[in-house]
Image: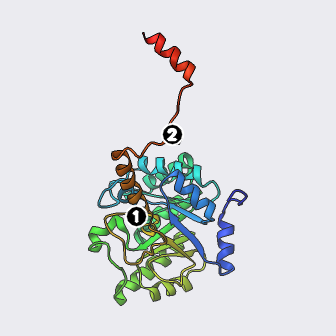
Amino acid sequence: MADRKKITLPRLFQKVANHEPITMLTCYDYPTAYFQEEAGIDMILVGDSLAMTMLGYDSTLPATMDDMIRHTQAVRRGAPTAWLVGDMPYMSYQPSVETAIRNAGRFMAEAGTDCIKLEGGAEMADRVKGIVAAGIPVMGHLGLTPQSASALGGFRVQGKSALQAKKIIDDALALEAAGVFSILLEMVPDRVCKIITERVKSCFIISLGSGPHAHGQLLIYHDMFGLYPKFKPRMAKVFGNAGEVILNGLKDYVAEVTTRQFPQPENYFTIKDDEFAELLKLLE
Ligand code: KIV
């Protein structure tokens, strides 16, 4: 969107006040960021899911700060006005408050993000407070938190029992008290998400597979366009099968090169006859 004004926190909170859902997607590269900006996406998350979607690992844990910074810089170049969220990778904030502040600062200074996101509830409140005190907005992440997938028993819905749901609600309120501007709820039952959305006052809630009651929605870009070959989470809606289009194009390319249908004259360059004649003389 060539003439869009920069998305700021006041603009996001204005959407919440107007009951306009916030749109959010993951993104990891320049061309996709360009298209997301053109489509008018409000918030872009450069998720550590890039370890899986872009680098082919089976979990998000191998993503490093340097991986995250490089991809986030590319996304910022493609999407100058979106609210850009840098996802703190595994062990970039867990060891200490100081480590968390330093790495959050790298996202802001080196990659031009507007905020950072980290996973965890009450146990992360001191990290959130420290980063917020350093002047950096923080988004929380509860429910299925992929960095803890092993402890959570895999990539599965969280908060299905009353006790688990109560813990997620308590964690959301603890994050709000610590100063987050927003909380992402991933794979939490819809009615639990509704309670949290209704209870929080100073932050807004984004849902990933947690239903329609949140203030906004997030999808993983690769899931919505059939670009992740290993699996598609149940909650993801496919808005277009780009993966199939690309695969068919690649098969056509192999067939056309093999059968010499490609290249055609419009696909290559020529030299004028007199220059070519001169060249042949030079080569004699
Ligand atoms: O890394 C990521 O893309 C995320 C989403 C799963 C929310 O954190």
Q: Quadrant of the N terminus?
A: bottom right
Residue wearing tag 2: 265
| Ligand 1 has an atom within 8 Å of the beta carbon of the residue at disc 2 | no
Percent x, y for residue 181?
57, 69
Q: Earlier in the sequence, mark 1 or mark 2?
A: 1
Classify 10 Å Cα crowding around label 2: few (below 14), some (14-19), many (20 and above).
few
Q: Position of residue 75 (x, y in %)?
A: 54, 53
Say which quarter of the image contains residue 110.
top right
**Residue 97, percent across and down?**
44, 57
From this view, report whether residue 215 is shown above or below residue 42.
below
Q: Which residue is mark 1?
A: 244
Amino acid carrying mark 1 in the image: Glu
Q: Quadrant of ligand 1?
A: bottom left
Do we see residue 252 in this rendering?
Answer: yes
Under mark 2, the amino acid is Pro
Across and down, in percent, residue 35 comes to 57, 59
Is 208 placed above or below 39 here?
below
From the viewer's perspective, tell me whether residue 19 is left or right of residue 248. Answer: right
Which residue is at 45% across, 63% downward?
242
Query: At x 60% / y 55%, what residue is drawn?
Result: 79
135 relative position to 222: left or right: right
Q: Nearer the viewer, residue 216 or 118?
A: 216
The Cα–Cα distance between marks 1 and 2, rounded to whole angstroms, is 28 Å
Residue beneath the point at 32% across and 76% down: 156
Q: Assess mark 1: CB under 8 A from ligand 1?
A: no
Residue 185 located left or right of residue 5: left
**Badge 1: how crowded within 10 Å, few (<14), some, or many (20+)?**
few
CB contact under 8 Å: marks 1 and 2: no
Which quadrant does the C terminus fall into?
Answer: top left
**Observer-nearest of 70 and 257:** 257
Give the SS element for disc 1.
helix
How many numbered dots are placed on residues in this image?
Answer: 2
